[in-house]
Image (tube, rainbow, N blue to C red):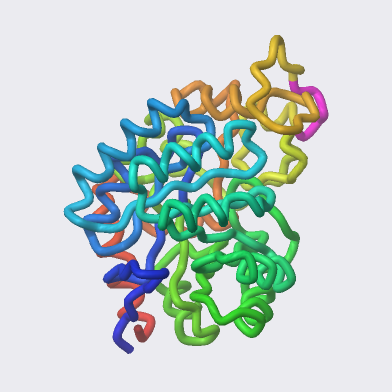
């Protein structure tokens, strides 16, 4: 099987791989650009970024992408959601991926700015709604994903329902940890592509601190847990000192608040927890991760281009 190109609106990626956008400042311009240069699609995790910071990261990604496709991921729950979207469109981002809630307004912004909008969904119903509003493609994310989760169902169960419900390109996400799973998605479910995030945390270009990456390198199956989040959604993370407190409902409540979310339970400060871990203070942070991080065979830190090459080799070995 020859790997297909991934076509989204007028964009064509040489490889059917989207590097998932990881906030806060885990996937920045350096990682997105390095991935895009391989022929895959590189994504900046824009949630939590100031507008000027996002402009800078988009320009860094563009410089490194060698003409490849770059996008942003922004969660609807962020208070600055529309401002982030407008900033990215003004910077002529190639595409915008959005999840953690559902926005109708974003589709008009996308049309006006000639920017494809890709919706992350976990049901056929929401996929149909996104298509009717003008989505250019759909990412189907199952319970296996890292970060905030919209379902407790597996991507392998949800995907066929969505594929049948819409005529758009449909991309599988959540638990796609190797080329073998990518091959399975392409061959058995006729996926147009896959989105992979967890694998790219171990890229040299990933902006996570060494302590964050080491947590990925040492993670076991027992370390992967589901936590509550002030966003109002469950989240998948790795055990840290703070995560243990969250699980026991003993996490410290926020001291002060800059109202970064549209709605927040104030159970603890998720944005500060993510900033702490990105900077290396994982004891006071949340380290989001996909369910199968422990299945990554080689957890050495290496260039993103080499990770992509390894994924392609794994897919070939699996029959793609």
Residue positioned 55% across, 46% down in the render: 289
Give coordinates of residue 174: x percent, y percent: 57, 61
Give coordinates of residue 162: x percent, y percent: 65, 76
Q: Nearer the viewer, residue 53 or 300?
A: 53
Q: Where, by quadrant of the figure, is residue 152 drawn? A: bottom right
Residue positioned 56% across, 81% down in the render: 167
Position of residue 74 relative to residue 154, above or below, is: above
Give coordinates of residue 219: x percent, y percent: 52, 45
Q: Is residue 45 magenta?
A: no
What segment is highlighted magenta in the picture?
A: 247-251
Give coordinates of residue 136: x percent, y percent: 50, 67
Point out the image quarter for the C terminus.
Answer: bottom left
Residue 49 is at least partly visible in this image:
yes
Q: Is residue 306 left or right of residue 320?
A: left
Q: Is residue 271 left or right of residue 44?
A: right
The single residue placed furthest to the top in the displayed view is 255
Position of residue 139 relative to residue 74, above or below, is: below
Q: Nearer the viewer, residue 150 or 61?
A: 61
The single residue placed furthest to the front in the displayed view is 112
């Amino acid at each position: 099987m020859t790997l297909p190109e991934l076509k989204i609106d007028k964009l064509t990626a040489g490889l059917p791989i989207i590097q998932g956008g990881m906030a806060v400042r885990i996937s920045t311009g350096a990682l997105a650009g390095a991935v895009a240069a391989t022929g895959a699609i590189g994504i900046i995790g824009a949630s939590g970024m100031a507008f000027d910071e996002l402009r800078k990261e988009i320009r860094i990604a563009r410089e490194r992408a060698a003409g490849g496709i770059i996008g942003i991921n922004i969660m609807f729950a962020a208070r600055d959601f529309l401002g982030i979207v407008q900033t990215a469109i003004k910077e002529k981002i190639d595409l915008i991926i959005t999840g953690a809630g559902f926005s109708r307004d974003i589709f008009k912004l996308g049309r006006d700015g000639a920017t494809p909008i890709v919706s992350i969904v976990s049901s056929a119903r929401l996929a149909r709604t996104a298509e009717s509003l003008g989505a250019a493609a759909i990412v189907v994310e199952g319970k296996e994903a890292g970060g905030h989760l919209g379902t407790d169902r597996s991507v392998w169960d949800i995907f066929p329902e969505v594929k049948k419900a819409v005529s758009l390109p449909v991309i599988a996400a959540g638990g796609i940890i190797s080329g073998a799973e990518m091959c399975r998605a392409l061959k058995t479910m006729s996926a147009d592509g896959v989105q992979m995030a967890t694998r790219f945390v171990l890229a040299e270009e990933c902006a996570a601190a060494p302590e964050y990456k080491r947590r990925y390198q040492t993670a076991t199956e027992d370390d992967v847990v589901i936590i509550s989040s002030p966003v109002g959604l469950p989240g998948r993370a790795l055990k840290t000192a703070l995560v243990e407190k969250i699980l026991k409902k003993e996490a410290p409540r926020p001291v002060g608040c800059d109202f970064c979310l549209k709605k927040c339970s104030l159970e603890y400060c998720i944005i500060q927890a993510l900033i702490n871990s990105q900077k290396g203070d994982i004891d006071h942070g949340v380290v989001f991760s996909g369910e199968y991080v422990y299945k990554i065979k080689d957890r050495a830190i290496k260039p993103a281009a080499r990770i992509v090459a390894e994924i392609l080799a794994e897919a070939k070995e699996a029959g793609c």
